[in-house]
Image (cartoon, grey):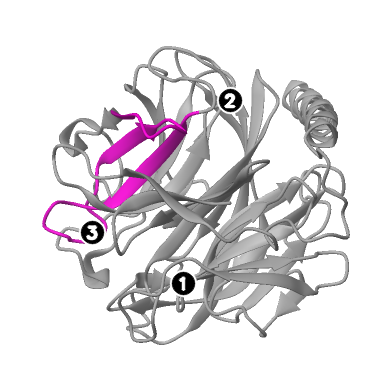
Amino acid sequence: MERNHSLLLRAGALSVMMLIMSATTITARAASNGDHAPGNSFIGAFNTVTVVSSTVPLNGDVNPYGVAQVPRSKGKLAEGNFLISNFNNGGNQQGTGTTIVQIAPDGTFSQFAQIDASKVSCPGGIGLTTALVALQSGLVIVGSLPTSDGTSATAEAGCLIVLNSAGKVIETISGHHINGPWDMTAVDGGSLAVLFVTNVLNGTVAANGNIVNRGTVVRLLLDIDDAKPELLDSTVVGSGFPERTDPNALVIGPTGVAFDGETGILYVADSLDNRIAAIPNALFRGSSANTGFTVSEGGALNDPLGLALTPNHHLVAANGDDGNIVEINPVNGKQVAVKLVDNTGGPPPGSGALFGLIAVPEGVYFVDDASNTFNLLN
């Protein structure tokens, strides 16, 4: 009886905590709308791409993937700066990058962290992915999908790595439905946080390049503590997304995630199906929405990877196969603007250049893997 009572109390606490975080997100989102009307394009008038900074640290890590903006100054973190995670080492082997760099809007560069794989308990080692968030508490959480030789044959489940504001690892989270964490977004309630994490290794390596429909989106509820955050709950809220290994991209599957606090919808970049999916009631649902419903597909979408919500509640997706950023109105699914931000390399031009991005009132910041730079479209 005592155990059942404890479980009921815990379930009630989780519901209350998620309600608090939902209200916090809605308030913050409403305050960030700015002057952009929902029906207008956010990036339509943007025509300039400026290189803000190189993303290469002293150890030579390359292939920048994740982008997160620092919400509050603490320790080594400066409010308004951006954190960038590197997926490759200096030898350009995928799934072996260990560094997170910090870049200010004026281009000032510093290294936030270099993670020593020998001192971190993460299945397979360290290969930092697009899954990167910075929380109000000063904690930084990054995903690892590691390999031992840069190939998908050696890819392992990985983990989420929690660092404090000094760049020191204080916790790792593995298991709990985490299997190849590829991208992530957070609903930050201060003392509590929800993480939405896409996973791309559920049967992918064993399929040997064939598509398997087992990609997932996992919701994690964290009790935030500067010394050691506690994982309270883990729930699969999306499943059945197509995924496969790839010799150039290592793995392709569900990638970018963006949460809209006003609607409670979690948007997912379904890369292999060239669509943007939506998972309704993402904060509160107790079961998987499978692959959700389709917001937009085809058209200018071409292997959408990074995904972000704009100040006017549109979505911007970074294409992996052509160097375009595509803006979508999620209300009607219309693709309202397309901007070419990298036409180098390929074929086709721009292929393999884009990954993580973030939309702020002054424009869209994005990483460019082809040039190992952090850039601004405005």
User: Residue 356, percent across and down?
Assistant: 48, 54
Amino acid beneath label 2: Pro
Name above or below for residue 205 compared with residue 47. Answer: below
Q: Going 47% across and 33% down the picture, which residue do you hit?
A: 105
Q: Which mark is residue 323?
A: 1
Q: Going 25% across and 42% down the picture, which residue do you hit?
A: 98
Does the magenta portion include 318? no
Please name the residue that numbered disc 3 is placed on. 147
Point out the stretch of residues depicted in magenta: 81-110
User: Residue 99, percent across and down?
Assistant: 27, 39
Among the two numbered marks 3 and 2 on one chain, the one whose residue lies closer to the N terminus: 2
Under tag 1, what secondary structure? Answer: loop
Camera-nearest label, 1 or 2: 1
Q: Determine whether, in the image, residue 171 is placed left or right of residue 49.
A: left
In depth, the one of 162 and 296 nearer the eye is 296
In depth, the one of 114 and 232 nearer the eye is 114
Amino acid beneath label 1: Gly
Question: Which quarter of the picture shows residue 234?
Answer: top right
Q: Going 60% across and 52% down the picture, which residue do you hit?
A: 218
User: Residue 34, percent across and down?
Assistant: 81, 38
Disc 1 from disc 3: Cα separation: 26 Å
Under tag 3, what secondary structure? Answer: loop
Q: Determine whether, in the image, residue 173 is placed left or right of residue 305.
A: left
User: Residue 214, percent across and down?
Assistant: 54, 72
Q: Which mark is residue 71?
A: 2
Name above or below for residue 4 compared with residue 133. Answer: above
Question: Which quarter of the picture shows residue 110?
Answer: top left
